Image (cartoon, rainbow, N blue to C red):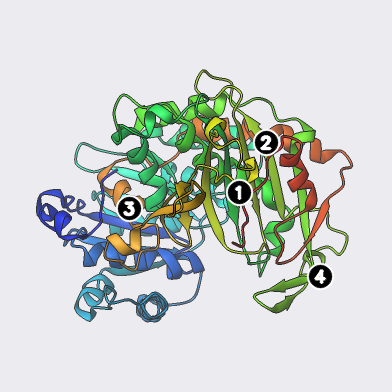
Amino acid sequence: MESIVASASSQIDDTRHENMPRRGPPGVFVIFGGGGDLTHRLLVPALYNLASAGLLDSHFSIIVVDRADVTATDLRHSFHESLKNFVTSRGTEAVSLHDDIWQRLATSIDYVRGSFEDTATYDALSQKIGNQNCIFYLAVAARFFGPIVDQLGASGLAKESTKAFRRVIIEKPFGSDLASAIVLNERLLRTLDESQIYRIDHYLGKETVQNILALRFSNGFFEPLWNRDNIDHIQITAAETVGVEQRARFYESTGAVRDMVPNHVMQLLAMTAMEAPISFDADAVRDEKTKVLKAIHTVQSHDVVRGQYTAGSIKGQPVVGYREEPGVDPHSHTETYVAMKLMIDNWRWAGVPFYVRTGKRLAARKTEIAVHFKSAPYALFRDTPVDRLTPNIMLLHIQPTEGVTLQFSAKIPGPTVHLGGVRMKFDYSEWFHEGPSTGYETLLYDCMIGDATLFQRADNIEAGWRVVQPVLDQMHAPAGLDFYTAGSEGPKAADDLLARDHRHWLKIGS
């Protein structure tokens, strides 16, 4: 996992050149389904940013594989328009669109039209790729993962040599439950070696997520406190203000549990709770993450809350309920919110609850990890009501802003001892020059150089599904939903989940 941060404060500028990562190797980046939204919004801007940072080799090229009746020229124009919109929407002084860089990237874009299941498509690809390094990005519906990899194997495109690597990046959803995840892993591994498979989770491209390990293991004052002796509980929140939008067909068969918990949420939990790896080698890090997930107790039904949003308002604008969204069954029991209490059965975390929640149409867009430390003894402050003492909380902000906040008590100036809550905050946008990052730059670059640290291994995937599977099994039985108004903090039952432990959620909308 190599940093691709360009520059920071004057102290960091002094070491900029010696810390600059190496350029990626020459090769071909093949995007199956490359005419779609993911490529326009995220992959092309990410590749442009890597080119701007000088991290793409001069012999790097892109091949888009899709069924649309377009030309390479059409795609280049479409990508250019998307890139201009990206720069405009995220523009700062550090962001600009350099036409010379874009032109160099654009001239490398080629197009292969064909079906993902047609051998002729792979014959055409083989002629264009030859014996070059190649990364295949599967920006397609999950039902095509297996067939595409099968065809890569049958055509010889997946075969590596001493002169060329072949790697496959796979987007989520990776299975729809534990059984299907195991089947998919087995199918992929019939063609590919585990070292060739890069299961991507864009949350792990966030700087704050990557910085969790640095914060914990490179600072002597954090890690000694990171255990059950000092931490009361941990809250992980992944809240969205958007609804189902145009994804009703996908979401109706998926829901919040499958969509977010076994991948995004479990990865955040694992990074927070894992033991120190023996090195930052990919397998060493992923070994420790898997150990954490395997140590999670079986989730009980009374520790799970499933909710669905009803009509309300977001930022003052009225929005319909989930069942009124286009394409949604008016009697749908698909959850748009889930909250869970998880317990980890190991020496570090025994007795420390991890509360996780994720949902749509909530009060604010926010992804954060809140580490709640145990309260200090109250002997010195016995005249101060306990609920007025500021709780010691470390907040790891992941989106929309990225940074870290520490909350603690301090004496209010004056002749008497009165305590007030204060915060110390580190914000990436203030300390580092903000670039137009999509969150995919680091992940794509790491795949190019063969660093799999931020990608999930087969056992990581299956361990995450094992945590979720009891919840999915309970959903087969008739089970009610707890409804919540769009724009609110979520269902009351989620508040009750913590209230019975004499705790409460941090506000999403604060």
In this rendering, position of residue 483 left or right of residue 434: right
- Rendered image: mark on residue 442: 3
Please tell me in which quadrant of the rendered image residue 474 appears: top right
- Rendered image: mark on residue 324: 4
Residue 403 horizontal/vertical position (percent):
40, 54
Three-letter amino acid code of the residue under disc 3:
Thr
Please tell me in which quadrant of the rendered image residue 472 appears: top right
- Rendered image: mark on residue 260: 1
Residue nearest the viewer, comparing 64 with 384:
384
Three-letter amino acid code of the residue under disc 4:
Glu
CB atoms of marks 2 and 3 within 8 Å: no
In this rendering, position of residue 306 left or right of residue 479: left
Q: Is residue 432 visible from the viewing direction of this image?
A: yes
Q: In the picture shown, does residue 191 fall above or below 7?
A: above
Q: CA distance from mark 1 to mark 3?
A: 21 Å
| Front: mark 4 or 2 | 2
| Front: mark 2 or 3 | 2
* Mark 4: few/some/many CA within 10 Å (<14, 14-19, 20+): some
Residue 77 horizontal/vertical position (percent):
37, 81
CB atoms of marks 1 and 3 within 8 Å: no
Please name the residue shown 59% across and 21% down the image. Answer: 345
Q: CA distance from mark 1 to mark 4?
A: 22 Å
- The residue that mark 2 highlights is 341
| Front: mark 2 or 1 | 2
Please tell me in which quadrant of the rendered image residue 500 appears: top right
**Mark before the other along the chain sequence, 2 or 1:** 1
